[in-house]
Image (spheres, grey):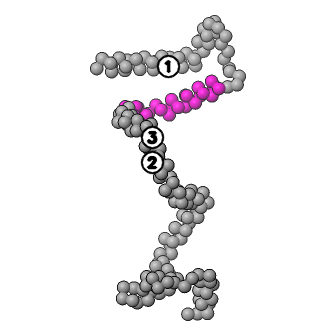
Amino acid sequence: MSEERKHFTQEQTRGVEAPTNEQRADQNGEHGIQRADPLEHLLETVAGKEKALEQLLNLVQTLDEKGFLRTIGYFASDFEDLVDAGIGKLITPQAFKLLSVGTTLKEAAGAIDAAPLPDIAKALNQFVQGATQAQPTIRVQGLMDVLKVIKDPDIQFALSAIFSGLKSMGKAIRTTDAG
């Protein structure tokens, strides 16, 4: 063993207790043959896998930079507590009720046509923005103001869409009740 290697090994083992007989037995192979020291064993294990190790270290570095490594560590260290909390939430009466209507919810979700949902979400977002303005752009103080506002083409279109939706919903409810 070179002097540099001895010095490195001494530095690494300073303050480390000597292995017990059981640990020494674990270091022996099946037939009592002594394995190479841990550093040599590590070098033999990683030999030829440098590219994979570099990719792994880059991945770990990226995870650390983005904060995911800390999150993973949190989940790993508190795994039992998280599982206990999750189980605690799953055994509540509300969770059992949700499970009992799960089939119905699945059927209902399957019946929804998702294609218009992005447009509906954009329109609802515009509605919320308009409805929550500190100074509304339209002032309605009586029936005459309502009649004036109804002449606006955007309001006419929105009302037509609402009434068309209500008509379609009413037809669907009547068809379901009749069936």
Tell me: residue 142, above or below residue 12.
Answer: above
* Magenta-colored stretch includes residue 111: yes
Task: Please name the amino acid that badge 2 sits on.
Answer: Ile
Residue 68 in which image quadrant? bottom right
Regarding mark 2 in the picture, which secondary structure is present there?
helix
Tell me: residue 157, above or below residue 2.
Answer: above
- Where residue 2 sits in the image (x, y, percent)? 58, 93
Residue drawn where x is 59% and y is 81% of the image: 16
* The label number, if any, that marks residue 92 in the structure image: 3
Q: CA distance from mark 2 to mark 3?
A: 9 Å
Disc 3 vs disc 1: which is toward the camera?
3
Secondary structure character of the magenta stretch overall: helix
Q: In terms of sequence position, does the residue under pointer 2 or pointer 1 come before the other?
A: 2
Residue drawn where x is 55% and y is 15% of the image: 156
Residue 98 in which image quadrant? top left
Which segment is the magenta one? 109-132
| Residue 44 seen from this side | no
| Neighbours of disc 3 within 10 Å: few (<14), some (14-19), many (20+) | few
Question: In the image shown, does 177 or 166 lie closer to the viewer?
Answer: 177
Tell me: residue 57, above or below residue 44.
Answer: above
- Give the residue at mark 1: 162
2 and 3 marks in contact (CB < 8 Å): no
Left or right of 136 in this view: 174: left
Q: In terms of sequence position, does the residue under pointer 2 or pointer 3 come before the other?
A: 2
- Give the residue at mark 2: 87
Residue placed furthest toward the left: 179
Left or right of 87 in this view: 6: right
Left or right of 3 in this view: 165: left
Residue placed furthest toward the front: 21
Task: Please name the amino acid that badge 1 sits on.
Answer: Ile
- Where residue 82 sits in the image (x, y, percent)? 50, 52
Disc 2 vs disc 1: which is toward the camera?
2
